[in-house]
């Protein structure tokens, strides 16, 4: 996961990736929780929001426990996971999927950032894009089988020029820029406001929101935001 983040952003992450937990999606009990239900004709599921609490870095090469719940309502599915080692809690994660009509996908109203060159960034990325090959690498790590991320035919049927970038991959790209600003996230809550397609140019911006909070924006060349993530910051040493 770290290598994939570096490949896309051109930036190294000094810490273990916040979203390393996606690799646990390959385990059968977790995959069952994350399994996509059958969509009705003319409808699809989109990533609505994501919340994570980073209590401790995930250890490597040691067994971890994953517990979860799934709450399915008529138009929304909410999945909660906790990752622990014995009695030690490492991460909690909640993600929500929203059911919308396929004809409404192009009508999602993104937030347009005004005066984007003067919003007081702590740091900002250069222009980036995510290739289909990089998405395929993410899919191999995460086990995400949603065809909207890989199938050009499915994308075309939904009126899209190309497959969609997975939301969790998009959020993972924030980490090196959060670190470059000298910050460390204790928790993150993100909402996805518009789709980002394969090979579409975008930037990541990190803003201070006070002594213990920050916000990251992911937006396209025309200042159309695709995701906004609010961070609660971990205390700094000393």
Image (cartoon, rainbow, N blue to C red):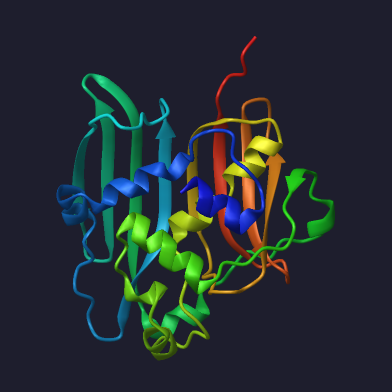
Where is residue 235 drawn, in percent x and y? 58, 19
Residue furthest to the top: 238
Depth check: give the residue in front, 175 or 3: 3
Where residue 66 sits, quadrant-wise, is: top left
- Give the mark count: 0
Q: Residue at x 36, y 43 (%)?
A: 21
Direction from residue 105 to residue 208 in the image, left or right: right
Q: Residue at x 49, y 35 (%)?
A: 16
Quadrant location, the C terminus: top right
Direction from residue 68 to residue 227 in the image, left or right: right
Depth check: give the residue in front, 152 or 234: 152
Where is residue 96 drawn, in percent x and y? 34, 55
Where is residue 179 drawn, in percent x and y? 64, 36
- Looking at the picture, does residue 98 appear above or below residue 11? below
Depth check: give the residue in front, 70 or 16: 16
Where is residue 229 drawn, in percent x and y? 55, 47
Where residue 83 sits, quadrant-wise, is: top left
Q: Residue at x 43, y 62 (%)?
A: 137
- Can residue 165 be seen? no
Direction from residue 123 to residue 53 in the image, left or right: left
- Looking at the picture, does residue 129 appear above or below residue 162? above
- Can residue 13 be seen? yes
Q: Residue at x 42, y 54 (%)?
A: 49
- Looking at the picture, does residue 121 appear above or below residue 184? below
Depth check: give the residue in front, 8 or 111: 8
């Amino acid at each position: 996961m770290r290598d994939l983040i570096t490949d896309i952003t051109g930036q190294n992450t000094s810490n273990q990736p916040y979203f390393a937990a996606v690799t646990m999606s390959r385990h059968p009990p977790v995959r069952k929780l994350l399994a996509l239900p059958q969509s009705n004709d003319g409808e699809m599921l989109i990533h609505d929001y994501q919340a994570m609490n980073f209590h401790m870095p995930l250890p490597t090469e040691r067994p971890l426990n994953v517990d979860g719940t799934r709450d399915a309502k008529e138009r929304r599915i909410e999945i909660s996971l906790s990752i622990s080692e014995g009695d030690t809690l490492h991460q909690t994660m909640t993600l929500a999927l929203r059911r919308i009509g396929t004809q409404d996908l192009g009508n999602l109203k993104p937030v347009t950032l005004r005066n984007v060159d003067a919003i007081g960034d702590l740091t900002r990325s250069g222009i980036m894009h995510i290739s289909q090959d990089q998405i395929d690498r993410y899919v191999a790590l995460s086990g995400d089988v949603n065809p909207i991320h890989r199938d050009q035919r499915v994308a075309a049927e939904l009126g899209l020029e190309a497959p969609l970038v997975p939301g969790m991959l998009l959020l993972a790209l924030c980490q090196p820029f959060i670190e470059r600003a000298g910050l460390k996230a204790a928790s993150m809550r993100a909402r996805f406001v518009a789709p980002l397609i394969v090979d579409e140019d975008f930037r990541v911006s990190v803003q201070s929101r006070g002594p213990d909070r920050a916000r990251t924006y992911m937006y396209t060349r025309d200042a159309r935001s695709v995701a906004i993530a609010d961070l609660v910051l971990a205390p700094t040493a000393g």
